[in-house]
Image (tube, rainbow, N blue to C red):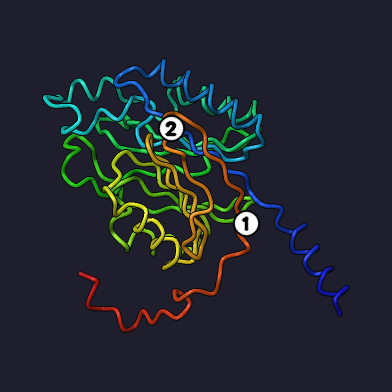
Amino acid sequence: MLLAILSLVAIASAADPGLRIAGISVTPRAWDKKANLATFEKYARQAAAQGAQLILSPEGFLEGYVGNDKKTPGLTREQYFAVGEPLDGPLLLRVAGLARELKVYLGLGFAERRGERMYNSFVVFSPEGAVTIHYSKAHTADDEPFNTTGVEFPVASTPFGKWGALICFDRRLPETARILAIKGAQLIMIPSWGTYGEMNDAMMRTRAAENAVWVAFVHPKRCLFIDPKGKIVAQDNGQGDQLVFATIHASTAPNGAIRSRKPELYRDILH
């Protein structure tokens, strides 16, 4: 019997070898896209050399998150539009090429110019350089006056499970992470700039536990990797710019309370 149990454990481990994630907990320069891309590339190469398969930046890393009028007083639409980068623009194509070169998934936050509109967006490129996830922030707390808000919560299937993404303020609304979990996400990536003070860690642990998902919170000053039971499995050490690593196993999601949902009773919140 013991031999049989050990064999099952070995099979489970082989079926889910885990995904090594790296968070780039680094503060970019405001307005300096070329310098920030060079910084992103430097840390991505370091992370890949240390075995990372998914490497994530904070929110708005490419341009230094200048689209927030509290962070950038006097910001004009013309200034913000000028710093925007299309998804198929030259700098994003370089990130796609880097993902191909390193054979990793690369996630970057950026101010996206899409036609005559701007978005606070996040893109993950696959090891083949293709777009795996392209998400635009849905909730901006009215402090990003020139951004159009996103209206979709995509979930992508990968060899390492199903992934979804939110951006910063999105995480404060429980419905956002719940939508991704209902759609099958096993990992929710949350590039951020604001931390929400001492409540942040508790909130991120709650989002993970209430949805039985892994959460990767990546911020210039804070990085958290949290398991589906709400346990922090890796975090920054508070010592400035750094890479933070964790290995996650998508198959370990517990049979949490989300499995007991009764949607037919929840009509009152659909307003």
- At horizontal 60% and vertical 55% (from top left) the residue drawn is 161
Give residue 239's mark: 2
Q: How many marks?
A: 2
- Quadrant for the C terminus in the image: bottom left
7 lies above or below 145:
below
- Quadrant for the N terminus in the image: bottom right
- Mark 2 surroundings: few (<14), some (14-19) or many (≥20) residues within 10 A: few
Q: Name which quarter of the figure residue 108 lies in.
A: top left
Q: CA distance from mark 2 to mark 1?
A: 28 Å
SS for callout 1: loop
Q: Position of residue 95 (x, y in %)?
A: 51, 26
Question: In the rendered structure, are the residues bearing label 2 and label 1 in contact, judged by CB atoms less than 8 Å apart?
Answer: no
In the rendered view, does 239 fall on the left or right side of 192?
A: right
Q: Position of residue 94 (x, y in %)?
A: 52, 22
Of the two numbered discs 2 and 1 in the rendering, the one whose residue sits closer to the viewer: 2
- Mark 1 surroundings: few (<14), some (14-19) or many (≥20) residues within 10 A: some
19 lies above or below 34:
below
Q: Position of residue 183 (x, y in %)?
A: 46, 63
Q: Say which of 122 and 199 sits in front.
A: 199
Q: Position of residue 111 (x, y in %)?
A: 32, 31
Give residue 154's mark: none
**Amino acid under disc 2:** Gln
Q: Say which of 234 and 154 sits in front.
A: 234
Q: Say which of 109 and 13 sits in front.
A: 13
**Lower sequence index among marks 2 and 1:** 2
In the rendered view, does 215 fall on the left or right side of 161?
A: left
SS for callout 2: loop
Which residue is tagged 1? 249
- At horizontal 35% and vertical 58% (from top left) the residue drawn is 202
**Amino acid under disc 1:** His
